[in-house]
Image (cartoon, rainbow, N blue to C red):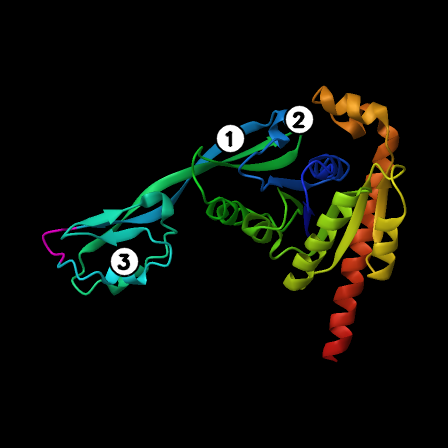
Amino acid sequence: MIISIASGKGGTGKTTVALNLALSLPDVQLIDCDVEEPNLHLFLSPRVHRTLSVTIPVPGVDETRCTYCGKCAEVCKFNALAVVKNQILIFSELCHGCGGCSLLCPERAIRENPRQIGVIHEGNHNGLSFVQGILNVGEPMPTPIIREEKKLIDRKKTVILDCSPGTSCPVIEGVRGSDFCLLVTENTPFGLNDLELAVEMVRALGMPLGVFLNRSDLGDRKLKDYCGKENIPLLAELPHDRRIAEVYSRGEIVVEKIPEYRDLFLLLFQKIQKIISGRSQDGLEGNL
């Protein structure tokens, strides 16, 4: 089972939920897909046993064969190449590694060279399998790293993906292919607005979803009313508890320091299991 944890905005408690859910269950693989600002390692201090380099292919030109026809620049939708006065300019930071320029060059003058954009760490923390991707500073494209992280998914385990905040390409790449997406939100006007955007994204991907409401005893009923109107299950509510903020600020883990909250995350997992099982059963019945 693969559960992605996402949120329409930052600061809702998404990482807190992903971390404590993972540590409340047995046999879990936790993957930090927020490769631009990963922070799960700050709480876990995992023992890293493997580091993988992530590269993308970028063009290099053999100018002894190049006729400066401009076909490579024409085919590149990202403006990573330009032909100027019998000279080819390559902007490797803009290159998406699609290989189109190399494929369509009539003179076969373009070769592809790997360029590192980040790394992936594999490790563990007290039996918890952990994967973390880190995008190099200044690199503009996190999605190739997320894609490589997800190749390491262990289907024998319960997999929890801590995705980036928002609804942009890195979030879509992280959520895509999950069995369930849990959207973490807060009871504020911004929380509701960005939850609506996140719901649209997940529905477009065609997967079941539910909502985790953080600091649930603050604010009004607008967010709950929205969930009811849209038939979105509100799976768990975490109250505004000063003890949680204190534990988090010390870099400690809520379910270890305040054990009473472990039951909340166990019940959350059981509800997710029930939704996934019900969806699978509906699919089987529809195929009969």
Residue found at x 64% / y 40%? 30
Question: What range of the chain is rendered magenta?
Answer: 62-66
Q: Amino acid at mark 2?
A: Phe
Mark 2 against mark 1, which lies toward the viewer? 2
Q: Amino acid at mark 1?
A: His
Horizontal placement of 178 versus 285: left or right?
left
Residue at disc 1, secondary structure: strand
* Residue linked to disc 3: 73
Whole-Å distance between the Cαs marked 2 and 3? 46 Å
Viewer-side residue, 43 vs 96: 96
Residue 61: horizontal and vertical position, in percent?
19, 50
Where residue 43 is drawn, which disc sits there? Answer: 2
* Residue linked to disc 1: 49
Residue found at x 71% / y 49%? 194
Mark earlier in primary sequence (3, 1): 1
Q: Would residue 161 be counted in the magenta stretch? A: no
Q: In the picture shown, does residue 75 fall above or below 3?
A: below
Residue 48 makes an appearance in the image: yes
Residue 286: horizontal and vertical position, in percent?
75, 77
Quadrant (top left, top right, bottom left, bottom right) of the C terminus = bottom right
Mark 2 against mark 3, which lies toward the viewer? 3
Mark 3 against mark 1, which lies toward the viewer? 3
Viewer-side residue, 47 vs 243: 243
Within 10 Å of disc 3 (Cα), the crowding (few <14, some 14-19, many 20+) is many
Number of marks in picture: 3
Residue at disc 3, secondary structure: helix
Residue 267 makes an appearance in the image: no
Mark earlier in primary sequence (2, 1): 2
Viewer-side residue, 266 vs 16: 16
Q: Amino acid at mark 3?
A: Ala
Residue at disc 2, secondary structure: helix
Horizontal placement of 74 versus 19: left or right?
left
